[in-house]
Image (tube, helix red, strand yellow):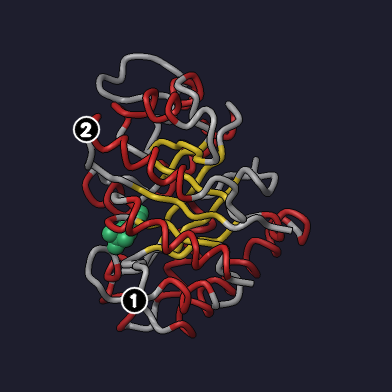
Amino acid sequence: MRRKLAAGNWKMNGTGQALSELADLARAHPDPACDILICPPATLLHRAVQISADNAINVGAQDCHAEASGAHTGDISAEMILDAGARHVILGHSERRQDHGESDAAVCAKAQAALNVGLTAIICLGETLAQRDASATLDIIAGQLSGSVPDAVTGENLVIAYEPIWAIGSGRIPEPAQIGEVHGFLRARLKERFGADISDAVRLLYGGSVKPENAAEIFAVPDVDGALVGGASLKAAEFSPIIAALEASD
Ligand SMILES: O=C(CO)COP(=O)(O)O
């Protein structure tokens, strides 16, 4: 049985002061019925891990390099993330695909590096508004899925986040049926490629303008195992009701 996952992506937000939100979140959810993950900027990883050592909050990174080490100024490796005490890494977020020109192949290589050291890879994919309007969503998703996910997946070490680009930070979300269509498609494609045991263990998150007000509706969609939350994960008071809605979902 998959355990639900409420994941927060802080993006390029937060200095040391923001870590008090982690402590608040931990206090609000001492024994959660789902996994809780916060992915702060790399500068806060180590401190976030220390704060979360004795509570139910997990800590993850937002990116890693595909190489294990070497002359890559400014980058961090999967092993460094592990060494900082984190166990998850977000990869292929649309902001990285866009800002840094990351291709599916690049994301796949990073995911392979993450799996090599035992991290769980949270691979993001999603269509633009133009692609949705052109009825190309499932084709785009299929291409991103096959190109970004490495063969080494064993099930629990993979999370897929479906994040329609037009829903990120926009306040707009797809219809529940549209989310369900993509998640069902992802599950079926994973099953074709990896078999039922592995595909049943992969968690599928929805991301894009998840808020306390819409969380319950999103979590009621079949094959939605949680959320990857941006803006609303920055404040414990906003993320906490989203976590509660996930805990309350079937
Ligand atoms: O990109 C996202 C999470 O990775 C979603 O961001 P928002 O929740 O701010 O729309």
Q: CA distance from mark 2 to mark 1?
A: 29 Å
What amino acid does circle 2 point to?
A: Thr
Q: What residue did someone put label 1 on?
A: 173
Indicate left or right for 208 with 194 as reference: left
Residue at point 27%, 51% (across, down): 95
Residue at point 26%, 38% (across, down): 18
Q: What residue did someone put label 2 on?
A: 15
Residue 121, percent across and down? 52, 42
Q: What secondary structure is found at the residue carrying circle 2?
A: loop
Please tell me which residue lies in front, 148 or 248.
248
- Image height of 65 relative to 97, above or below: above
Name the quarter showing ligand 1.
bottom left
Residue at point 37%, 79% (across, down): 174
**Mark 2 surroundings: few (<14), some (14-19) or many (≥20) residues within 10 A:** few
Residue at point 38%, 40% (across, down): 22
2 or 1: tag closer to the N-terminus: 2
Residue 86, percent across and down? 49, 30
Disc number lying in front (2 or 1): 2
What amino acid does circle 1 point to?
A: Ile
